[in-house]
Amino acid sequence: MHDDRNHSGFKSRTIRMGAIAGALALALALSACGGGDSDESPSPTPSEVTSSDTPSATPTVEPETLTDLSAISVSDDWGTEPTIDAPYPFEVDETMSKVIIEGDGTEVPSDTATVNLHYVGMNARSGALFDSSWINGAATTFPLNQLIPGFAKGVVGQKVGSRVAIAITSSDGYDPNGQIDAGINPGDTLLFIVDILDSELAGPEGEPVAVPDGLPSVSETDGVPAITIPADLAEPTSVGVQPLIQGSGRALEATDALTSHAVCSTWDGTEYYNDYGSAAVTDAVDGGAVHQALFNALVGQQLGSRVLVTLPGDQAYPNGNKTPSMAPNTAAACVVDILFTQSYSG
């Protein structure tokens, strides 16, 4: 949906998710940089998340190695900051999780999914709190592949509405360098308590819609749509919007960020864009050069929907495109799966 008309068609990832409202401290503290230098992932600022009840002294006893999380007790009052009783210091030899509250929502589909959650992050060596969305004052939204690997391992497959305890090995965390500014040494196990508030969908969810005549046809193979445009089908003269699967979730607003999969074809039937083989893409009008006509066409469509959008040449590529090569006033058709929406402040 990205309006990179001289480069790559409609879409590219335009949002640096840490800029989305609420996605601040955790996106910094859990960067997959492992404590190294990175322009994308600055060091965390643990001074912002201190607690008078949090122990700070480094224990002198050797940590106990846990083979499961049965010794960790977490409060199960949904919607409230969790309290934690754990046998500090401890470590784990493999990343593991324990469901405290079992949700009944959609499952987090993959380690690239965008999620919204509350969390508490503890150092299992010292018992010290190093980050908390509750103290920061807001739940966070981000794609899991921006975080340390162990976090995604504990969240993927869990259902929205769940509270999950995740113990993360140092190798799935910040080894080899640690995050010294956050009090995390090389070799430290981490403990997170995560409330999963929302998640990107794995694909469209809803009711199939009968499509009227006079539109491109859309087939599907293994969840991936393909567009067929009959040779005798006239180009559109205005933007057309036709749901193929009608979702029932939150309607996309003009100021939102949208996470989606899409496939696009020029009116001669040439497919020039298809991102179903990679992570879903996030766009927002204020976050980059989004293709305005396509984004506008999707405003008001509901989460879970699959939508066919037809664009006349003066809306799709009035000036043509360099890569892939398109002549001026090339018309196009796109199928978009609306997988996640969120308020966005650029």
Image (tube, rainbow, N blue to C red):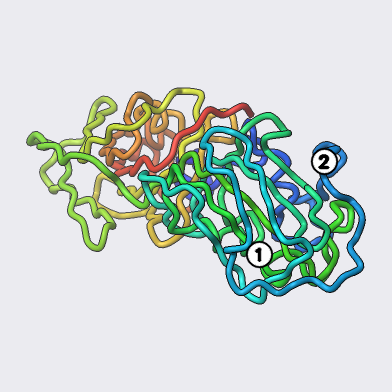
SS for dot 2? loop
Most extreme residue toward the left is 213
Residue at mark 2? 53
Residue drawn at point x = 31 percent, y = 55 percent: 271
The quadrant holding residue 317 is top left
Q: Is residue 305 left or right of residue 342?
A: left
Q: Amino acid at mark 2?
A: Asp
Q: Residue 28 location in percent, x, y?
A: 74, 47
Q: How crowded is the residue under tag 1: few (<14 C-alpha within 10 Å), some, or many (20+)?
A: many
In the image, is residue 296 above or below residue 102? above
Q: Which mark is residue 42?
A: none
Q: Amino acid at mark 1?
A: Ile
Residue drawn at point x = 71 percent, y = 72 percent: 171
In the image, is residue 285 above or below residue 125? above
The quadrant holding residue 305 is top left
Residue drawn at point x = 90 percent, y = 60 percent: 58
Q: Residue 254 location in percent, x, y?
A: 46, 23
Q: Quadrant of the N terminus?
A: top left
- Give how far apart the Cα atoms at labels 2 and 1 are: 23 Å
In the image, is residue 253 above or below residue 73? above
SS for dot 1? strand
Residue at mark 1? 168
User: In front here: 115 or 77?
Assistant: 77
Q: Residue 279 location in percent, x, y?
A: 47, 56
Q: Residue 18 location in percent, x, y?
A: 67, 41
